[in-house]
Image (spheres, rainbow, N blue to C red):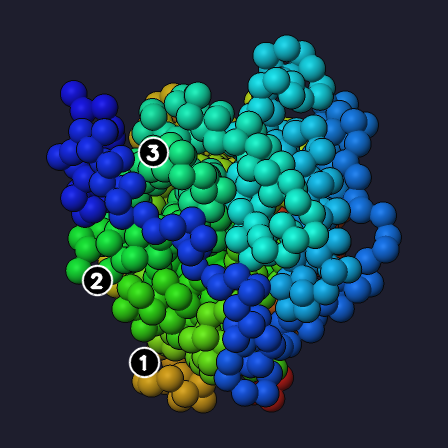
Amino acid sequence: MPTHFIGPLGAAFGLSAAAPPERRATLAQLLVDPARALPVAPASDRAVWTPGWGTAPGGVDAETVAAVLLRAEKERGTAWPLPLASTAARLHRDGNRTAHEELVLGRQRRLSRAVVAAAVTLEDAWVDEVADGIWAVCEQSTWCWPAHDDAFATRGWVLPDRARPFLDLGAGEVAGQLAWADHLLGDALDARYPGLRARVRGEVRERVIDPFLARRDWHWIGLDGDVHNWNPWIHGNVLLAALRLLDDPADADLRAHVVDLVVEGLDRYVAVLPADGAIDEGYEYWWNGACRAIEALDVLAHATDGALDALDPATPVAALRATVAFPHRMHLGGDWYLDLADGRALPPADQPWHALHRAARRAGDEDARRHAASYRVPGEPVADEDYGLGRLLRAVTDADWLAAGPGEAPLPRDVRLPSTQVLLAREHAGSPRGLTLAIKGGHNGEHHNHNDVGSFVVASDGVPVLVDAGRPTYTAQTFGPDRYAIWTMQSSWHNVPEIAGTPQGVGAAFAAREVVPGDGELTLDLAGAYPVDGLAAWRRTARLERAAGHDEERDRRARGRASVTVHDAWDLGAAAPAAAVVHLVVAGDVTTSPGLLRVVPLGGATPVVVRWPEDVPVDVTVRTLDDPMLSEVWGETLTRLTLDVTDRTDLTLVVEQDDTIDDDAITQEGAL
């Protein structure tokens, strides 16, 4: 049995047949010198680090740099954010994890701003600011976020065990940030703070490299086949640290050893990436999962002078190229996206679009490139420090991204993702106007899972109306045994039935059956998602009926309206007689009457009406949203309709845009 896991990367790179010592020897020969291993020029290269793109090509992006420096100037001379024992311990006292994490991340963001300021100006005062930030990070007792540390589980401690560093997302991010800072400002730091770079290397070795090597059972490696977004996120940062900070010639073999294990770890992630490129964690987590893998492999390609290039069209790693399309396949319109699992329907618009743009260029995916370019606004900053120093540096130095003009999002007419059993269909390719239907099958053991087998979303002009609520702010409960006590995670707050008073079960065994996609439709049996003895079947067909004619709105109305139809038919079998209801979660201003729901969506999109048989009793629940993670998406409330179908064997819902509203009231702005 081979010592190494062999997956698509190992095969594509020609490493699969080699024994570990041979692999490492090959990597040691392929890896370039540490000083040029990272794909950004150091600050000593003034042709790059002189702002110039605001007026003429050449140099880093002037608007982005100006915005970063403005923020940096405002805080210089003030106290740095200081994580405390009391803030760390809150996780175990009241479940609050964000107070401490915001202090940690606030310090790292300030350091990133200082690094950019120092690189652009090379002023001693900014190098001092960088040194202060690096020193503070090195003095921090742990780089692991309290929510991830195992000291409480293993020792009952509410504070970390410094003698046993835990390698998590937080520790990886610090190591990656320090590698980028060292790479960019090494000469300036050596001149003004001799010894500081040695301190960085020692801390990264002790807190990240050594634990990475010593423990090969980290859950995020995916030895059990359960590989999630932590894998590429952490491996990518370990790669940065090894490439740049293991720069002593005596460490050449160690450097190759770490890179070899990183490639093996990323291989485990790529091996489970489905052929359609879908991410069961949803669009928002793509940026910290598949995108992180692509970014890490892009760094590896640079560090080997292109010898190990997973995105080269000639390299047979098709799933990587397929996942580049995932963001635009989940796009509803404007800044709205189909939210699955712990995603948000209105995620931050300032994602690292340059990373997608670069990946799309390298993979040859024109639609993905157009999607990324649709967020490029000339004259505005191209990135900020919120997503990490490395992403900021890549953005401001990517000439193709800086030169990209604004484009139109592709908005494909039909999307089918067999791996996650997701279907999305819209009225017209290239436009959010009209109705969009999305529905998923899947199972209830997905990553960042919500119990949502068979749930659907309907959008009007790209704005969700029948919705998935998404997630609230993360707390200790979110990833603990009481996760499904959180209302947003329950099937009772998704657009699915509840049978015999029983919501959907938790775990991969609770899954859709007999999933059959069609043209603009998906049919599936939901019965397997419910722990109801004797339940025979609950078949759901969701279908978008496109109007006759072409894409013009007035012609659509003249020739017949498009509609979404959701038809449920069930056989309770041995579970009968039993109560049964169907839930609908609605965003916007709601009015109801027998058999009718009218919704004015958020942002002024075209209103919709939902119809069902008038004799079906309906209960209406208005939920006040007191969590900003939810209210910033949906406003002050969400409304849930509960349709009582106990005495029925089927139910048909029909959704249409409300053509009683005047055309002038329908604006493209409403869809955005």
The amino acid type found where label 1 is placed reads Ala
Q: Which of the two discs, 3 and 2, labels the residue nearer the N terminus?
A: 3
Disc 3: CA contacts within 10 A as few (<14), some (14-19) or many (>=20): some
Which tag is nearer the camera, tag 2 or tag 1? Answer: 2
The amino acid type found where label 3 is placed reads Asp
- Residue tagged by mark 2? 313
Which tag is nearer the camera, tag 1 or tag 3? Answer: 3
Q: Is residue 418 left or right of residue 600?
A: left
Q: Which of the two discs, 1 and 3, labels the residue nearer the N terminus?
A: 3
Residue 537's image quarter? top left
Q: Quadrant of the N terminus?
A: top left
- Residue tagged by mark 3? 253
In the image, what residue occupies the spot 27% across and 69% down?
364
Depth check: 287 or 433 in front? 287
In the image, what residue occupies the spot 45% across and 89% down?
554
In the image, what residue occupies the spot 38% across and 32% down?
254
> Is residue 279 in view from this perspective?
yes
On the image, the x and y values in percent for residue 574 come to 35, 23
Depth check: 50 or 630 in front? 50
Disc 1: CA contacts within 10 A as few (<14), some (14-19) or many (>=20): some
> Answer yes or no: do the residues labelled 3 and 2 have beta carbons within 8 Å?
no
- Residue tagged by mark 1? 548
> In whole angstroms, how far apart are the C-alphas of marks 3 and 2?
31 Å
Seen in the picture, residue 367 relative to 56 is either above or below; the reply is above
Q: Which of the two discs, 2 and 1, labels the residue nearer the N terminus?
A: 2
On the image, the x and y values in percent for residue 374 come to 48, 75
> In whole angstroms, how far apart are the C-alphas of marks 1 and 3?
66 Å
